[in-house]
Image (tube, rainbow, N blue to C red):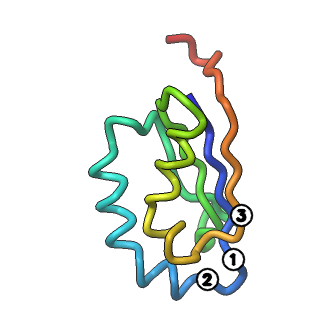
Amino acid sequence: MYAIVCFDRPDSASLRDTHRAAHQEFLKANSEKIVFGGPLKSNPEGASTGALIVVNCATRKDAEAFIGADPFFRNGVYESVAVRAFKQVFPQK
């Protein structure tokens, strides 16, 4: 498993809005790989400032290819993206 942490570019809200439908379709089409995920926010009611997605991919290269195909990534919504190996320890499966 890999955790993908994405941080939006400053003032990228309009880009996010423009590409939201394509991003959601991408997530839906790849849902079998996604363990969990969702937007990062500056506060519970605030605008999205990035995303955390944990994916079930065999290799880091596969996880990087996954996020590289995301419309938010391809269209410049994200300022930075980190892909790290992830081991779920809680709750136990």
State how far apart marks 1 and 2 are (Cα).
Answer: 5 Å
Q: Quadrant of residue 12?
A: bottom right
Badge 2, how many Cα within 10 Å: few under 14, some, many 20+? some
Q: Amino acid type of disc 1?
A: Arg
Dot 2 lies on which element? loop
Residue 93 % position (x, y): 49, 11
Answer above or below: position of 22 versus 63: below
Height in image: 66 above or below 44? above
User: What residue did someone put label 1 on?
Assistant: 9
Kindly report which numbered mark, 3 or 2, lies closer to the viewer in this rendering.
Answer: 3
Report the quarter where the N terminus lies.
top right
What amino acid type is highlighted by mark number 3?
Answer: Ser
Q: Secondary structure at mark 1?
A: loop
Q: Which residue is mark 2?
A: 12
State the image coordinates of residue 81 (x, y, percent, origin top left): 68, 57
Check disc 3 and report the residue beneath it.
80
22 shown above or below 37: below
What residue occupies the far front of the structure in this picture?
Answer: 61
Looking at the image, tell me whether mark 1 or mark 3 is earlier in sequence order.
Answer: 1
Who's the residue at 50% across and 46% down the image? 37
Verify CB contact (< 8 Å) between mark 1 and mark 2. Answer: yes
